[in-house]
Amino acid sequence: MEPVINIQKLEKIFYTGGSTVRALRGIDLHIMKGEFTAIMGASGSGKSTMLNILGCLDQPTKGTYLIDGIDVSKLSKNELAEIRNKKIGFIFQSYNLLPRTTAIENVELPLLYNKKISAKERRERAMEALKKVGLESRVHHRPNELSGGQQQRVSIARALVNDPVVILADEPTGNLDTKTSYQIMEQFQSLNEKGITIIMVTHEQDIAEFTKRNVVFKDGNIIRDALVQNRQIATDKLRDYVEKD
C-alpha cells in the first residue's frame, strides 16, 4: 500500500542576509491513509517549514515529496494550486474565514474553483460538511456571530468539502480554551475514525496525545517518531472536564 505522504531525503535551505539556514536536513517521512499524526518541535525546529512543503505552499531545495503518488517537485505554480485545492484540506489557528460571508458560503469557497460542480451541488456539499461538524443550525451565521469553537468547526467543514486525501491543521487549538480544544479534538478523532488522514502541527503535548503518532523535529531533523502509547480520548476528557466545572 502506497503512503498518502511519501517524503525522501528532503532538504530546505534558506539564504538570508548572506547567511545559509538549513531548515530541513534530509527528512524521510511516510504517512499512510487513515493516520492521525502530530508534528511537534520548538520554534525554529523545522516543523513550520515542513508544514508549508506538505501543503504545497513551498517547495524543497532537494529531495522528493509525493502526495497521493504525485511528485510535487515537478509541478508548475498552477498545478501546485490545483493540488492544494483538490488533495489538501487546510485548518488554521486563526480560522481564516471571510468575515462578511456566512458559514455555508465560507465552506463553499474551495468548490468555486471547480467548474464541473454546479451551484446546487456546491451548496449541497457545503451543507453536508457543516452537518458533519454539527453546525447545520448555524449555516447562515457570519463569523462574528459564532464562538471561536464554532468558527474552527466552519474551517474544518471547509477543509472537508473537497474530500481531500489529507487534512493539514496548523495549531488548530491555539486560540481556544481547554473545553473548546477538547471539542475540536473530539471532532478530529471522529473524522479520523471515518478514515480521514490528519496531520496536525502543535506545540502542546497534551493536544498531541489525542493523535495516534507523534513526529518531533529539532534543528531540521526528526528526533522522534513514535506511536502514542497512552492515547487520550477527547470524549472522555470532555466529560471529565464538564463534571469538574
Image: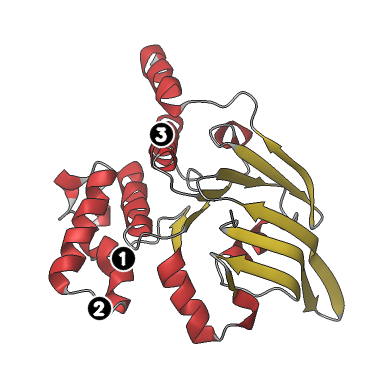
The residue shown at (44%, 48%) is: 196
Residue bearing mark 3 = 186
The spot of residue 89 in percent (x, y) is 43, 60
Please state if 97 lies on the left or on the right of 181 as rendered: left
Quadrant holding the C terminus = top left
Q: Which of pointers 1 and 3 lies earlier in the amino acid sequence?
A: 1
The spot of residue 170 in percent (x, y) is 53, 53
The spot of residue 74 in percent (x, y) is 63, 82
Q: Label 2 vs label 3: CA separation?
A: 33 Å
Q: Label 1 vs label 3: CA separation?
A: 25 Å
Q: Which of pointers 1 and 2 lies earlier in the amino acid sequence?
A: 1
- Numbered disc in front, either 1 or 2: 2
Q: Residue 64 carries which label?
A: none
- Which element is circle 2 on? loop
Which amino acid type is shown beneath numbered disc 1? Leu
Residue 102 visible: no
**Closest to the observer, 118 or 4:** 4
Q: Which mark is residue 98?
A: 1
- Numbered disc in front, either 2 or 3: 2
10 Å crowding of disc 1: few (<14), some (14-19), many (20+): few
- Numbered disc in front, either 1 or 3: 3
**Closest to the observer, 136 or 172:** 136
Q: Which mark is residue 116?
A: 2
- Which element is circle 3 on? helix
Which amino acid type is shown beneath numbered disc 2? Lys
Which amino acid type is shown beneath numbered disc 3? Glu
The residue shown at (54%, 44%) is: 35
**Closest to the observer, 161 or 148:** 161
Colour scheme of the picture: secondary structure
Q: Which of pointers 2 and 3 lies earlier in the amino acid sequence?
A: 2
Q: In this view, does 222 lie above or below 64?
A: above
